[in-house]
Image (cartoon, rainbow, N blue to C red):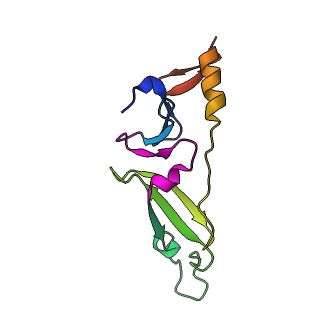
Amino acid sequence: MASNGNRLRITEYLDLDLEREQWMCNRCGHSLGAGRDNYKKGCLLYDRDPREVHLPIVEEQFSFAPDPLWVRIVEFYCPQCGTQLETEYLPPGHPLTFDIEIDIDTLKSRLQRGELRVKDQRLEVAE
């Protein structure tokens, strides 16, 4: 696992290792793939029936539960420790979203020039 000085906390459970340019689970340090690619490709997926999550309110044709013909719930998990990293609601057949794209070259350049710094896995403007 890389030192904390090279890792940025991106979300509650997702880090970016700037030295290795890898997405990382910040709970176990497992690599989830290239930092220039979609981290979701390195996750385990659970494609859920939305009626499991949003139970029908009434036992009628229109039950107020999402119709699985219209929406699916996709959960993303770390394949090593099982931490849930993300959830998204998508129409059936829709590709997974690419929700985080970081300009790693510009970020590294700004860090090198001293404009930014990493402190406690957080990005700060240098003074």
- Residue at 48% x, 39% y is 22
Direction top: furthest residue: 127
- Residue at 41% x, 39% y is 26
Q: Where 4 sits versus 60, above or below?
A: above
Specify the quadrant that holds the C terminus. top right
- Residue at 48% x, 60% y is 75
Q: Where are the magenta residues, as a range?
A: 26-44
Figure quadrant of residue 125: top right
Specify the quadrant that holds the N terminus. top left
Q: Position of residue 86 (x, y in %)?
A: 50, 53
Q: Is residue 83 magenta?
A: no
In the picture provided, is 96 more to the left or to the right than 1? right
Q: Where 4 sits versus 49, above or below?
A: above
In the picture provided, is 112 more to the left or to the right than 46? right
Q: Is residue 32 magenta?
A: yes
Q: Position of residue 3 (x, y in %)?
A: 39, 26
The number of numbered discs placed on residues in the rendered structure image is 0
